[in-house]
Each structure stands twice: as structure tokens, then as C-alpha cells.
Image (cartoon, rainbow, N blue to C red):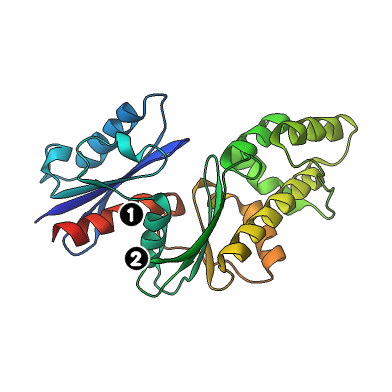
Amino acid sequence: MRYFGGCDSGSTYTKCVIIDETGKMVADVTLKSRINAVLSCQDALDQAVAQVPDLNSAEDLTYLVGTGYGRNKVPFADENISEISCHAMGVHVADPEVKAIIDIGGQDVKGIAVDTDGTVLNFAMNDKCAAGTGRFFEAMARAFEMDLDEFSNLSLKAKNVIPITAQCTVFAESEVISLVGEGKPMDEIAAGIELSVAKRCFVMSKKAGAVDKITLTGGCAKNAGLKAAIEQVLKLKVIDLPVDPQLMGALGAAEFARQKGM
């Protein structure tokens, strides 16, 4: 049996997926990224390989594709492919019915339109500002003195929405701290935060023409409040993937590796 790997070196998390000849996922790892991307990738690869009895090291993989922010840092990679292409392919493998993706990464937001074969039809990306990204949500959770899991569910309890006017992460954090200090309901502030990000996501998806049969990828896809806000703004149901949405880049990279290595 031959095995194929994909390593997604993100700014916040490093993900690794290994699949077999049939495309079945046999190993997956998600780790917090370290300052040294090479070491982060090596750790993820080592832990993924340890889940497959037939493998001793990443060098035993038939083909390995690197993707993500640090894709050029993936040890033993045979090829590097953009995260946009890998997210599209990963989602196609997970659910071929999906035709549009909103990917919310650690430092950017992307809208991706997917063709019937998993290739990219079009995309739009906001990478000039951290607002609406994973780092933005980390800042918001910090302002609330909560962890991300607790924050992601907070807005679901809100009966009203307090708008957040600041478009910059730094100013938004200051605005949130001021609102909390004024005694405003924290769930309603959180709802305003989620809605402001959902509107940014809508702009990216519309620019890319990614507006139907849509799903979310990236770590922020696990944010229940954000998902609800995006559904409200898009006026449609977001498709839930059968595989961890944070693994889509690595899964797509592994599938590209399988196609190249077979």
C-alpha cells in the first residue's frame, strides 16, 4: 500500500493529513504553529506518520505536497501548491456537492468558487487587514476574557445585536472593551462582532461568485456564532462537512499528492 501526504503550514495552526491509494484518510494532525515553520511541519508529519504502522518517516510517503502560508518550509515535500487550490480540492473530496467556500484563516479571509472537478473557478481574498480572521477572534476573546470556544457560542444567546463600527482589529478591540465597561450585554456585543465578520465574508464570497452550495473552512468554521451570522447574511444554509473543516487544506494537498504519485 502506498501513502500520500499533505501538510498545511498555516500562520496559526499546522495540519497534516495522510491518505492511502484509495483516498481514505488514515492519519490527521493539527498543531499550534511555532515560530519556526520547519519544526512545526516536522512535528505534524512525525505525529501523522506515527499513526500509520506501515510508515517509519515522512520520507516513506510516495508523494508529499506542502501548502499554506509556510508551504515552502515543509520538509521532504515533492511539490508546493497554493492553499486556495488545496482547500477547493479538499472540500471536493469531502463533499462533491459543495460549489463555494468561505475560508477564514489565521490572517486572511477567502471566497472560493469550486468547479465540478474540485479545481478553482474564481477566488477573492482579503489579506491586507486582520479584521475578520482567526487572529481577530483571538483578540475579541481576549477582550471578553474568554477562551475561543466559550466566545464562539456566546452570540447564540443574544436577543439583540450591538453593532461594532470599527473595521480595524486594534480599534475593534478597544471598542469592545469600552462597551463591556459600559455594562452592555456581552452576548449582544458578541453578536455584533460575529455579524460584522459575516458581512466581510459575504463581500469576499460575492466577489468570487461563490454564493451557492457554500461551506466554511479553516479553524473559524467551528465558530457556531459566526456560522449562524453568515447564514443570516447569505440567507442560505451553510453545508456542514463530514471532515474537520480545519483539515481541508491538508486533505486537498494529500489528494493532489495521490493524483501525482499514482
Q: Residues within 10 Å of mark 1 (few under 14, many from 20)?
A: many
Q: Amino acid at mark 2?
A: Val
Q: Secondary structure at mark 1?
A: helix
> Would residue 247 be seen by someone viewing this image from the given angle?
no
Q: Amino acid at mark 1?
A: Leu
Q: Position of residue 54 (x, y in %)?
A: 10, 46
Q: Position of residue 229 (x, y in %)?
A: 69, 58
Q: Secondary structure at mark 2?
A: helix
Residue in front for this viewpoint, 176 or 211: 211
Mark 2 and 1 residues: CB-CB less than 8 Å, in contact?
A: yes
Name the image quarter holding residue 94. Answer: bottom left
Compared to 6, does 227 lie above or below?
below
Residue in front for this viewpoint, 185 or 15: 15
Question: Could you give the CA–CA distance between mark 2 and mark 1, rounded to whole angstroms?
Answer: 8 Å
Q: Which residue is tagged 1?
A: 251
Residue in front for this viewpoint, 218 or 128: 128
Q: Position of residue 96 (x, y in %)?
A: 39, 72
Query: Residue drawn 25% across and 38% down?
Result: 45
Which quadrant does the N terminus fall into? bottom left
Q: Which residue is tagged 2?
A: 93
> Would residue 198 be seen by someone viewing this image from the given angle?
yes
Q: Residues within 10 Å of mark 2 (few under 14, many from 20)?
A: some
